[in-house]
Image: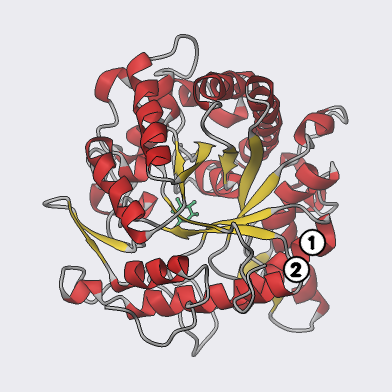
Amino acid sequence: MTPGNGFPAGFLWGAATSAYQIEGSPLADGAGPSNWHVFSHTPGCTHDGDTGDVACDHYRLWRQDLDLMAGMGLNAYRFSVAWSRVQPDGRGAVNPAGLAFYDRLVDALLERSLAPNLTLYHWDLPAALEEAGGWTNPEIVDRFAQYARILARALGDRVAMWSTLNEPWVVVNAGYLHGVHAPGRRDPAAAMRAAHHLLLGHGAAVRAVRDESPRARVGIVVNIEPKYPASTDPADVAATARADAAMNRLYLDPLLLGRYPEEMPAIYGDAWPDHPAGDFALIREPLDFLGVNYYTRAVVRHDDDVPFLRAAPVPQPDVEHTDLAWEVHPASLTRTLLWLRERYGSIPLYITENGAAFPDPDTSPPEGLDDRRRVAYFRGHLRALREAIAHGSDVRGYFAWSLLDNFEWACGYAKRFGIVHVDFATQMRTPKASARYYAEVVRTNGAEFDAPEVPQ
Ligand code: FCB
């Protein structure tokens, strides 16, 4: 540990992005359409009908984006691979041009001393696989492992850090249960099947990556949102436990304890399937690390009108919320990290996403660049992270979400998370105050994160 600041030596300081949110050119060079391409082109599915057709044009401007990170002094970059560039219909032959894009990207990262942290699946599934049932179809487990194998074989000599899935909870809940993300389904039984296949696919991909690249460190990225009861009423306390089970423990328990939370059959009733006991050995394949995406917490009350969960979030008055109405609550990051160790034992952790959408003054430079609320958000969460580390949490890196303003899924381009401003009409990038602040954090390995002044 470096004296005086609380961040370990060798700490990874990075920024995170994902393929469909930044790349644009989704069908270039032989790529197939993804489920997000289909979904965003379906009228009414995204804000203003926004799509990822252009996004940040990173597919063409990637060198510039890597230079931006190098200029900030970052030492790591978390990105995802678009499966449908590598295997246009999700099966069979590799599309060499698609794979070459990531091959070049990885080399260019290493040239800039940015450690590549690769996510295999950040929500964009080849459309052909979605048409065949997507994650509800058990065949996807082998397909995903095949795809993981292709990438590990091609990049495993240079990429040391691999994540299988990003936020399976969002895939299941937004995609298959509530229909607000691709593929837009609203089917509880399908959603619960998808959850199980995501976990099996994860385990199969871990094995495939390790087979191809013995040096690879392999993990998964989950989003954790701690739940607090709105009152001491036992009904609220029980509702809180259900909300926690269905969001947080539904994924962590099978991954790390080899079983589903006991609340699940009561929550989902007939929609909750029986699972062969033998499946858990694969799901529980040991992890080298756990990636934690942390944004907010939830206060929960009992509510009979909410199907299955019978629990509803209670918005907190008089506290800060981001542009997505997410409560700003840094103390819950500390609590999350300490809870992880308490419940699951010690496993190396990375904060793989943390950040905030704010309506940057008028979103255009120069005013739009003085994003002091985002700076304050980062400062509060870095303080909370240091606190967790001081209490023994084994956190080895932090990735700010996000490098660039980008396609924020169903919210389209209306919500900006970037530390670098993107003018979507000209593709001009301009670092915001938060980028300068973060560069200073990185330069001092965290020592300066508390400094009151944002360096100009
Ligand atoms: C996470 C996603 C990421 C981004 C942020 C704001 O759930 O992983 O792609 O949308 O939220």
Residue linked to disc 1: 341
Residue at point 44%, 72% (across, down)? 325
Q: Quadrant of the N terminus?
A: bottom right
Residue at point 76%, 52% (across, down)? 347
Q: How many marks?
A: 2
Under circle 1, the secondary element is: helix
Provide residue 419's location: percent of width, then percent of height: 34, 64
Q: Residue 361 vs residue 212: left or right?
A: left
Under circle 2, the secondary element is: helix
Q: Can residue 368 be seen here?
A: yes
Marks 1 and 2, how far apart at CA: 5 Å
Amino acid at pointer 1 = Arg
Taking the view exactly as shown, the residue that stands out farthest to the front is 3
Relative depth, front residue between 453 and 188: 453
Image position of 441 with respect to 4: above or below? above
Relative depth, front residue between 416 and 131: 416
Amino acid at pointer 2 = Leu
The 10 Å Cα crowd at callout 1, few under 14, some 14 to 19, many 20 or more, is some
Residue linked to disc 2: 338
Image position of 61 with respect to 342: above or below? above
